[in-house]
Image (cartoon, helix red, strand yellow):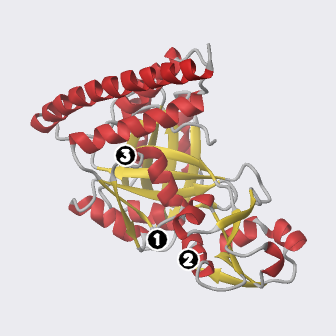
Amino acid sequence: MALDELRKKIDSIDAEIVKLLNERYQTVIEVGRHKKNSSGIFYVPEREKIVFEKVAALNQGPMSQTTLKAVYREIMSGALALEHPLNIAYLGPEGTFTHLAAVSKFGHSVAYVPKGNIDDIFADVHNGRADYGCVPVENSTEGVVSHTLDIFVNSDAKICAEINLRVHHSLLSKFPMKSIRKLYSHVQSLSQCRAWISEYLPDVEIHECSSNSRAAATAAQEPDSAAIAGAFAGEIYGLNILAQNIEDNPNNTTRFLVLGNQMPLPTGNDKTSICFAIKDRVGVLYDALLPFKNEGITLTMIESRPSKVQNWEYYFFIDLLGHIEDEKVKRAIEYLRPQTQALRVLGSYPCGDEAQ
């Protein structure tokens, strides 16, 4: 076919795509009416997972699965906006990795509300000012975000989804690298890029910032300055990427949680998070973990935090593979509960995709 004919074919296909998308969205509006009259829950993580799996199975190429998922992420984001306008609270300011994680989960068609601290995100979800919240919980290099775990002790927010985000750092600036005299970044990012900084910017004046987004905003205003942050922050603050993927560990990944007020249904590939309080004694952790071993349940995270009420009392946080409605998970938790002073199921939710 001649080039003009190929382009006409693409135009015809585009017209059909737009027609079908609008048919899909008209159906979405009807779905939204049903949800409003029944559960009132518009974001359904388990349904989202099923849709992604079904369209991935239909894809015969040459489109990559990554491209297909990105397209459907935005199609479903538009559907959420039509069903019910959503507000998503995240740890701001704009351009943070938490912001990027939230967008990767909910797409660009919902409203995002930056918050100054993690406490405010929990509070907004609890009070209904936000439909959902996105918070960091652990990093493969730095470990858990202890403050996030601590808030769960006294919060009724439920975990309804998780996001695994590969953290890539870039050198961002409006100026060429040879003219850079000041470097702004968060202390963790500086630590994660230490080898690259030593090799390529050994003599720059380093300034620590409260967030990488703040660093990018500062670098955008000051001459001969640069920031280490994500490319997403560079887009928001109008900075050029001088070097990308400059982190020392290319597999550096952060896990984020989506907070809400619902418990997703089982999908067959789920994770459950619990926390419980126990008094310190010989063998107490062994006894607490034994029911999971006996039921053949895989644990993916174990963390302890002091109760802050009495010395030598701790809260333990456990992530396990399985849903709270699975019989073996029920049995393990029923066996554990009498051994604890308090036990809460923080959420059962679909396992997040592997970080890209």
Callout 1 touching callout 3 (CB < 8 Å): no
Q: Label 1 vs label 2: CA separation?
A: 10 Å
Q: Give residue 68's position: percent from left, percent from top.
A: 52, 29
Residue in the picture at 31% in, 36% down: 44
Q: What amino acid is found at the position of numbered circle 2 in the picture?
A: Ala
Residue indicated by mark 1 = 93
Callout 2 touching callout 3 (CB < 8 Å): no
How crowded pointer 1 is (Cα within 10 Å; few <14, some 14-19, many 20+) is rated as many
Instruction: Describe residue 141's horizontal placement relative to residue 325 as left or right.
Output: right
Instruction: Describe residue 70's horizontal placement relative to residue 50 as left or right.
Output: right
Could you tell me which secondary element the residue under label 3 belongs to?
strand
Q: Give residue 264's position: percent from left, percent from top.
A: 33, 36
Q: What amino acid is found at the position of numbered circle 3 in the picture?
A: Val
- Image vertical order of residue 170 relative to residue 252, above or below: below
Q: Give residue 313's position: percent from left, percent from top.
A: 48, 66
Instruction: Describe residue 118's horizontal placement relative to residue 181 as left or right.
Output: left
Could you tell me which secondary element the residue under label 2 belongs to?
helix
Q: Earlier in the sequence, mark 2 or mark 3?
A: 2
Residue indicated by mark 3 = 345
Residue indicated by mark 2 = 217
Residue in the picture at 68% in, 72% down: 173
Of tags 1 and 3, the one toward the viewer is: 1
In this orientation, does residue 334 appear? no
